[in-house]
Image (spheres, rainbow, N blue to C red):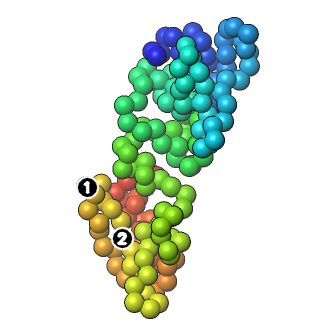
Amino acid sequence: MNQKALKNALNYDPLTGSFWWLSGTHKGKRAGTLSSIGYIKLALNSKMYQAHRLAVLYMTGKLPTSDVDHINCNRADNRWSNLRVVSRSVNGHNRARANSNNKSGWAGVYRFRGDSWIAQIASPHKSKQYLGIFDSPEAAHLMYLVAKEVYFGNS
């Protein structure tokens, strides 16, 4: 898929994130369907594409070679202002909740001896960075969020 072929088939509205068919039996109708995991997908030339990846192609002229992150964590929100091309590591840090195996319920927070809580983060180089011991999981999570901003920016 290239930008010219995409623009001949679809119109993309960067303010709403929607694609619209330009020709054929669906001309003028919104393109795409919601997948079972929350992404908008659509078929072009008998091939399935994720709409957020096509949005990048439409706007930049290149299909992304790395991840396309939905900044607000809503996989169906393909507004241009909500998308950014990032590494897999950065994309993994932009999540709405802690990993399913995290017993504290707070991203970057782990219980430590009784009622103390450790904050830590995986740095961009994959090493774990110790951020300190705190009296509450909320305080530890706040430190994690500060470190996340330092390492990964607006995610």
Residue 43, percent across and down?
A: 59, 21
Q: Earlier in the sequence, mark 2 or mark 1?
A: 2
* Residue in the picture at 43% in, 52% down: 92
Q: Position of residue 14 (x, y in %)?
A: 59, 29
Callout 1: helix, strand or loop? loop
The answer to the question of whether label 2 and label 1 lie on touching residues, with beta carbons closer than 8 A, is no
- Dot 2 amino acid type: Gln
Mark 1 crowd level (few <14, some 14–19, many ≥20, 10 Å Cα): few
Left or right side of 71 for 148: left
Dot 2: within a 10 Å radius of its alpha carbon, few (fewer than 14), some, or many (20 or more) residues?
Answer: many
- At horizontal 61% and vertical 34% (from top left) the residue drawn is 40
Q: Disc 2 on helix, strand or loop?
A: strand
- Image quarter of residue 117: bottom left
Q: Identify whether 44 is placed above or below 55.
A: above
How far is disc 2 from disc 1 in space, using C-alphas?
A: 14 Å
Residue at 50 percent of width and 55 percent of height = 95
On the image, which quarter does residue 111 sit in? Answer: bottom left
Residue that badge 1 annotates? 125
Q: Position of residue 103 (x, y in %)?
A: 50, 74
| Outermost bottom residue | 114
Q: Which mark is residue 110?
A: none
User: How many labels sit on residues?
Assistant: 2
Residue shown at the point (51%, 38%) measured from the top left: 83
Residue type beneath disc 1: His
Is residue 149 visible from the viewing direction of this image?
Answer: yes
The numbered mark at residue 120 is: 2
Residue 153 seen in render: no
Q: Nearer the viewer, residue 99 or 64?
A: 99
Q: Position of residue 105 (x, y in %)?
A: 53, 72
